[in-house]
Image (cartoon, coloured by chain):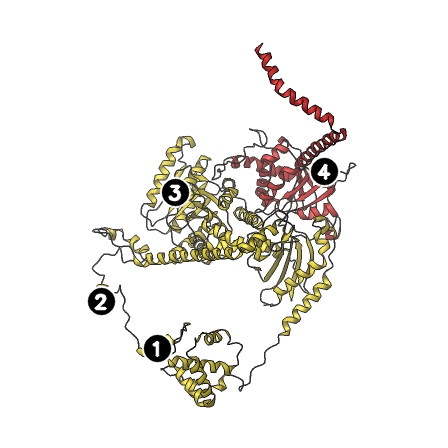
């Protein structure tokens, strides 16, 4: 049933492999894909991965630096695989302990691991154990619960079927009830907590009759009106039900329908977020005289939503902080001796050892503005990487974990492909086509400002730039770009570049379709032999579906060379949501089967954060794409590239 | 006159102490004195040896196998050390082992196989670059055309690194995977790389500085004003062809004769 099973060292040498019967393709491809996407991108918290039709599960052995990978068809759901991998790992370790302990690449190369027989035996055992739990036989009618009830009890009536049910059971088992009721009445004075507890915990162990009896006792107790200390949710609604429904009063609703008539008043405050897009655009005259008089109050809907979100985040953070405070209290005394014990001698790391350190690191990362779920995924991945590893002498658990976390952070921030815009522009120039860069992002992150900075950098290096003003919605967007163009041209006058202005703006005013303008701009650039086209788009919220569709259409139709997502460094947990939704929208609305997703990230407003640089980690972790530019200010010179080591240093600094 | 008196006064306070000490020493057992002198000598010698051993670790004694992902470094490593063919996967950590060169001296040094994946490459190169006495840059000759910019960038990054330009290790560019029919020859790869490096000199020096102010290295490759050629570099550069898999497939020998010869000449 398994397609393949491999055991290889972390250095890449395959020690042993097994290929299932009838499987012809080599498994090197899928396993390499597994390594690149999961292990190297620090997503090892979740130990399964799908690649085309194959589902891969893996396990890391950190003591001997081995990786165990099993692959099987995705459509099969094999329940024994997890336990099987663990068994194989233990077996392999025990059998080849001597060889593996020598820890040299030479020993691995020279030794031959004849593991087939053991493997086949383990596989057989695993398959048999999964078959052993045969199909459960159906219960006969007499043994089922249904035969206990009467027909009358199964008819649901309005007054609550509990009464009817009790009635039915009381009629049937009158004898049982009498002795049961008396001890219950006697018990009434005692705290009913014990009975409550047994009901909550012990239902699985009791037979059906006993459950019915207990529930009956409960009901009688409630009927008697005994004070129930442990809150049970059922008495309250039972009491409230006979009262009937009260009329609900909305505090903000007002009392008459006249207040709901907005036909007289002006349009500004009442419009919802999504609507105003097209209406206001088509009709600029309508905005005249709409701001006369006092400013209207801010929209309650959106602000409440934001407040709620902030509260939730704050509560989450407080909860996380509390749990972390509790843990060290417990382990402080034992931890002291543990630390001394851990200092000397070789000790292998276990989950419990790493738990307190990882919690502290997770809180530290969250305090440095890394998104909460990213921080926890990272810590899980580091735990998986270190589990079972043998520490050297005089190294504490904390230092090992910190070192591993630092390595993984640097690894995440390193670009997974070559990032050299100038070289790619030269390549495009040699192919006689313009290099197209598109900027997308939410509102107010700095797209236009950083576009101007990037065009300054490009013209300093002698490339001609065409700016396409595809932000046809925001007032002043085109004028802003025109001002930038004039300034850049005055800094690099056309006389220096053969009489031709080095920066030009392609704009078609407001209200037009952005994708069409972009296509025309690229065609114009090709005709006029511009080197680079920078496409500025309007800012849009990630859950605004029509605008996301429009962006996806722009990108799918124009196929830019680089799609840059502009994100500010101040963003916290929102970064995850923004990037996921942007990528999702781009993937959904493109017609081809290889959709253009976000290729790079521009991190702006980097000068406003001191060392709370966590947004960089969140963004690169979510997309797997590199940070191409870092904006560190508002003048043309404030454009940098990312230094992974410096950012990780600032992140790990206490 | 005063100076003389001062000097004498300076000597005089110590003189009685010195005399007392000398008298004490004379009274002691000569073996005791010999013991003290011997232990002092041992301490000094061990200190010197310790320093020598510490410093000798940083003496270049390693040959690095570097290259892009999937260029065949781990298989080459296996072939050089044991001659066997082993299936390989993408390396996550480095492999290192002592290697005996096939020359008359029988010198042995460490062969280190560095992972080629882009996210791991910088940290491992950082770790091993100062210990390198030679760098074997493995290139996948079959898909070289597509990867030429990535290969050139990595090579540029290696050559302009401060530690490498200081130690000047010899560079061997091994054009691997020659058993595939579409593989490019070493000469062609050399020409293409020279052209690429020429362009890279311009674009890399114009690249943006990093956000904390540290600019990239300012090493300029080759001669200014002239087109870049590998012969302009301060280190010895050699291009050769090899095939780790070998023409007969998995069970045959690998065609790494020229590589072994170059390694022997180190």
Kindly indicate the quadrant of the structure image that contains residue B185.
top right
Q: Residues within 10 Å of mark 3 (few under 14, many from 20)?
A: some
Say the numbered circle drawn on residue A257.
2
| Label 4, label 3: how far apart the Cα atoms are | 54 Å
Q: Chain of mark 1?
A: A
The chain that appears red in the image is: B
> Which residue is depicted at the point 42% across and 56% down?
A318
In contact (CB < 8 Å): disc 4 and disc 2: no
Labelled disc at residue A549? none
According to the picture, the residue beneath numbered tag 3 turns out to be A449
State yes or no: discs 1 and 2 in contact (Cβ < 8 Å).
no
- Which comes before the other along the chain, label 1 or label 3? 1
Tell whether A132 sits left or right of A474: right
Q: Is residue A142 left or right of residue A603?
A: right
Chain in yellow (letter)? A
Chain label for disc 2 = A
Q: Which is more toward the observer, A447 or A606?
A: A606
- Callout 2: few (<14), some (14-19), or many (20+) C-alpha neighbours within 10 Å? few
Q: Which residue is mark 4?
A: B262
Q: Alpha-carbon neighbours of circle 1 within 10 Å: few (<14), some, or many (≥20)? A: few
Judged left or right of residue A284, residue A645 is: right
User: Label 3: chain?
Assistant: A
Instruction: Check disc 1 and report the residue beneath it.
Output: A239
Total tally of numbered discs in the picture: 4
Q: CA distance from mark 1 to mark 4?
A: 92 Å
Residue A236 place in picture, x, y as percent: 37, 75
């Amino acid at each position: 049933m398994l397609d393949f099973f491999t055991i290889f060292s972390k250095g890449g040498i395959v020690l042993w492999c097994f290929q299932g019967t009838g499987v012809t393709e080599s498994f090197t491809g899928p396993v390499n894909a597994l390594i690149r996407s999961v292990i190297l991108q620090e997503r090892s918290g979740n130990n399964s991965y799908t690649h085309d039709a194959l589902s891969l599960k893996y396990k890391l052995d950190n003591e001997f630096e081995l990786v165990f990978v099993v692959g099987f068809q995705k459509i099969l759901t094999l329940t024994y695989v997890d336990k099987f991998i663990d068994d194989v790992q233990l077996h392999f370790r025990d059998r080849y302990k001597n060889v593996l302990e020598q820890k040299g690449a030479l020993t691995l190369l020279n030794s031959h691991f004849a593991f087939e027989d053991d493997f086949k035996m383990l596989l057989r055992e695993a398959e048999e154990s999964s078959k052993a739990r045969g199909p459960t036989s159906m219960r006969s009618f007499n043994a089922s619960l249904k035969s206990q009830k009467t027909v009358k009890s199964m008819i649901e009536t309005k007054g609550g079927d509990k009464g009817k049910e009790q009635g039915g059971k009381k009629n049937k088992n009158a004898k049982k009830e009498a002795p049961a009721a008396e001890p219950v009445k006697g018990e009434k004075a005692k705290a009913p907590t014990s009975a409550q507890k047994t009901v909550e915990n012990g239902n699985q162990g009791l037979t059906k009759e006993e459950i019915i009896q207990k529930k009956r006792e409960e009901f009688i107790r409630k009927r008697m009106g005994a004070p129930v200390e442990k809150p049970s949710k059922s008495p309250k609604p039972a009491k409230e039900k006979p009262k009937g429904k009260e009329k609900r009063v909305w505090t903000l609703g007002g009392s008459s329908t006249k207040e709901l008539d907005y036909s007289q008043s002006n349009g500004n405050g009442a419009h919802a977020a999504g609507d105003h897009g097209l209406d206001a655009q088509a009709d600029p005259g309508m905005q005249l005289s709409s701001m006369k008089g006092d400013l209207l109050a801010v929209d309650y809907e959106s602000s409440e939503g934001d407040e709620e979100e902030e509260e939730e985040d704050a509560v989450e953070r407080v909860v996380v902080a509390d749990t972390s405070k509790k843990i060290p209290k417990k382990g402080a005394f034992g931890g002291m001796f543990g630390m001394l014990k851990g200092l000397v001698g070789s000790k292998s790391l276990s989950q419990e050892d790493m738990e307190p350190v990882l919690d502290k690191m997770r809180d530290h990362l969250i305090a440095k503005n890394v998104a909460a779920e990213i921080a926890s995924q990272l810590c899980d991945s580091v735990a998986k990487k270190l589990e079972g590893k043998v520490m050297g002498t005089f190294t504490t658990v904390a230092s090992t974990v910190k070192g591993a976390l630092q390595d993984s952070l640097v690894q995440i921030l390193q670009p997974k492909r070559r990032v050299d815009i100038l070289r790619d522009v030269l390549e495009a120039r040699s192919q006689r086509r313009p290099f197209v860069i598109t900027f997308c992002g939410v509102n107010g992150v700095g797209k236009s400002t950083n576009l101007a900075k990037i065009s300054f950098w490009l013209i300093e290096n002698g490339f001609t730039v065409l700016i396409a003003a595809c932000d046809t919605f925001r007032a002043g967007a085109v004028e802003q770009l025109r001002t930038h163009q004039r300034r850049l041209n005055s800094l690099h006058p056309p006389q220096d570049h053969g009489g031709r202005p080095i920066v030009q703006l392609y704009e078609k005013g407001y209200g037009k379709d952005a994708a069409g303008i972009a296509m025309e701009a690229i065609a114009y650039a090709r005709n006029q032999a511009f080197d680079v086209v920078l496409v500025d788009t309007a800012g849009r919220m990630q859950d605004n579906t029509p605008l996301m569709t429009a962006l996806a259409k722009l990108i799918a139709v124009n196929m830019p060379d680089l799609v840059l997502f502009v994100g500010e460094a101040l963003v916290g947990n929102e970064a995850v949501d923004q990037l996921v939704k942007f990528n999702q929208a781009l993937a959904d609305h493109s017609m081809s089967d290889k959709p253009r997703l976000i290729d790079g990230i521009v991190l702006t407003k980097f000068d406003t954060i001191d060392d709370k640089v966590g947004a960089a980690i969140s963004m690169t972790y979510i997309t797997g794409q590199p940070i191409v530019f870092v904006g560190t200010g508002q003048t043309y010179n404030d454009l940098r590239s990312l230094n992974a080591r410096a950012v990780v240093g600032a992140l790990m600094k206490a | 006159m005063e100076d003389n008196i001062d000097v004498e006064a300076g000597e005089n306070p110590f003189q009685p102490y010195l005399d007392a000490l000398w008298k004490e020493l004379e009274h002691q057992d000569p073996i005791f004195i010999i013991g003290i002198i011997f232990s002092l000598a041992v301490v000094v010698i061990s200190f010197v040896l310790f320093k020598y051993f510490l410093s000798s670790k940083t003496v270049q004694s390693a040959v690095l196998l570097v290259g892009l992902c999937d260029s065949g470094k781990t298989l080459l490593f296996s072939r050089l050390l044991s001659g066997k063919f082993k299936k390989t996967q993408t390396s996550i950590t480095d492999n290192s082992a002592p290697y005996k060169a096939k020359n008359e001296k029988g010198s042995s040094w460490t062969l280190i196989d560095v992972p080629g994946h882009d996210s791991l490459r910088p940290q491992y190169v950082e770790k091993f670059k100062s210990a390198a006495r030679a760098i074997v840059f493995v290139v996948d000759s079959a898909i070289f055309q597509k990867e030429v910019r990535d290969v050139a960038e990595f090579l540029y990054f290696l050559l302009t690194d401060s530690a490498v330009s200081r130690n000047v290790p010899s560079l061997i560019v091994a054009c691997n995977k020659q058993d595939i029919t579409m593989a490019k020859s070493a000469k062609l790869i050399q020409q293409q790389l020279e052209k690429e490096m020429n362009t890279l000199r311009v674009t890399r020096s114009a690249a943006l500085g990093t956000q904390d102010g540290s600019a990239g290295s300012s090493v300029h490759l080759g001669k200014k004003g002239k087109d870049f050629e590998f012969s302009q570099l301060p280190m010895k550069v050699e291009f050769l062809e090899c095939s780790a898999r070998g023409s007969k497939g998995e069970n045959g020998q690998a065609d790494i004769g020229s590589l072994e010869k170059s390694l022997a000449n180190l």
